[in-house]
Image (cartoon, rainbow, N blue to C red):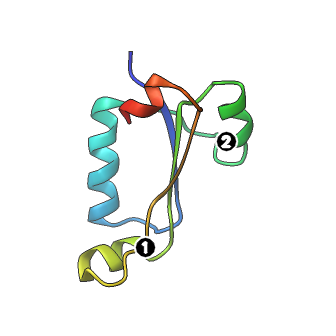
């Protein structure tokens, strides 16, 4: 059983983001359409994990500047969240 996640991408299309999403597709079930209601989806355990990619992530990753960190939200005490 793969963890259910949603990805909110504020950084746009890039090879870095596409590669990360492609990898996550192999080990998770990516749910779409929950970007505006992810808090409710977490509360009702329709999702296990929410990944938010902030604007500027790709540039900071490639330049190894001051890293723009990925944000995430999980269902507390969920083994599925831990797996992601």
Give the foreground label among 2 and 1.
1
Q: Secondary structure at mark 1?
A: loop
Label 2: how many residues lie within 10 Å, few (<14), some (14-19) or many (20+)? many
Q: Quadrant of residue 77?
A: top right
Q: Residue furthest top?
A: 1
Q: Quadrant of residue 37?
A: top right
Residue 5 appears at what percent x and percent y?
A: 49, 36
Question: Which label sits on residue 68?
Answer: 1
Position of the N terminus by quadrant? top left
Q: Nearer the viewer, residue 45 or 33?
A: 45
C-alpha gap between disc 2 and disc 1: 22 Å
Answer with left or right where residue 44 lies relative to residue 27.
right
Query: Is the residue 4 above or below the residue 8 in the image?
Result: above
How many numbered markers are drawn?
A: 2
Residue 29 appears at what percent x and percent y?
A: 42, 28
Question: Which label sits on residue 7?
Answer: none
Residue occupying image coordinates x 62% and y 40%: 33
Label 1: how many residues lie within 10 Å, few (<14), some (14-19) or many (20+)? some
Residue 55 appears at what percent x and percent y?
A: 50, 73
Residue occupying image coordinates x 47% and y 69%: 11
Residue highlighted by disc 2:
38
Mark 2 and 1 residues: CB-CB less than 8 Å, in contact?
A: no
Residue occupying image coordinates x 37% and y 75%: 67
Q: Secondary structure at mark 2?
A: helix
Answer with left or right where residue 18 lies relative to residue 80.
left
Position of the C terminus by quadrant? top left
Disc with the residue nearer the chain's start (2 vs 1):
2
Q: Quadrant of residue 18?
A: bottom left
């Amino acid at each position: 059983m793969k963890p259910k996640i949603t990805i909110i991408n504020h950084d746009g299309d890039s090879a870095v983001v596409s590669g990360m999403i492609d990898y996550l597709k192999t080990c998770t079930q990516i749910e779409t359409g929950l970007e505006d209601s992810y808090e409710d989806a977490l509360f009702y355990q329709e999702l296990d994990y929410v990944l938010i990619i902030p604007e500027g992530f790709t540039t900071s990753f490639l330049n190894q500047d001051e890293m723009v960190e990925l944000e995430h939200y999980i269902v507390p005490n969920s083994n599925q969240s831990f797996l992601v």
